[in-house]
Amino acid sequence: MDKAAFSMAMLRILSGSIEVTAAIIMLRLNDVQKALVVNSMLALVGPFVLISTTAIGLIGLSDKLSPVKLIWILAGVGCLLIGILRK
């Protein structure tokens, strides 16, 4: 089994578990303001998981990609992050 693919999958499973846990917490709190706070905290998890899984994938592919393709991928990820994090 490829270590990079396994690590990426485990990070996504962890992220999904955090999302489900947050949903359960929101249901238990039963208050819109508190649920919004929990939801806001999730906004920190998403970009971190995206950056981490992408970095692991790029490291796993680095020996198979040409430098030009690697630059294009990094530029694309940069555009995604700007789109996600910009208000």
Image (tube, rainbow, N blue to C red):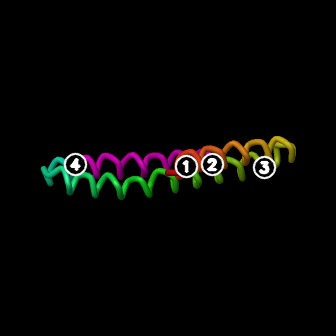
Provide the residue designation for mark 2.
Answer: 54
Q: Quadrant of the N terminus?
A: top right
Q: Earlier in the sequence, mark 4 or mark 2?
A: 4
Residue 54 locus on image (x, y percent): 63, 48
Residue 33 locus on image (x, y percent): 20, 55
Q: Nearer the viewer, mark 1 or mark 3?
A: 1
Distance in Å between CA atoms under marks 1 and 2: 6 Å
Q: Is residue 9 magenta?
A: yes
Distance in Å between CA atoms under marks 1 and 3: 18 Å
Distance in Å between CA atoms under marks 3 and 4: 39 Å
Q: Amino acid at mark 4?
A: Ile
Identify the secondary structure beneath mark 3: loop
Distance in Å between CA atoms under marks 4 and 2: 28 Å
- Discs 3, 4 touching: Cβ within 8 Å: no
Position of 34 with respect to 19 (left or right) is: left
- Discs 4, 2 touching: Cβ within 8 Å: no
- Disc 1 packing (10 Å; few <14; some 14–19; many ≥20): some
Q: Amino acid at mark 2?
A: Thr
Provide the residue designation for mark 1.
Answer: 50
Q: Earlier in the sequence, mark 3 or mark 4?
A: 4
Position of 34 with respect to 70 (left or right) is: left
Q: Amino acid at mark 3?
A: Ser
Magenta region, residue range = 1-24
Q: Earlier in the sequence, mark 2 or mark 3?
A: 2
Identify the secondary structure beneath mark 4: helix
Q: Residue shown at 78%/49% (left/top)?
A: 62
- Discs 1, 2 touching: Cβ within 8 Å: yes
Provide the residue designation for mark 4.
Answer: 24
Q: Residue shown at 35%/55% (left/top)?
A: 40
Q: Residue shown at 13%/50% (left/top)?
A: 30
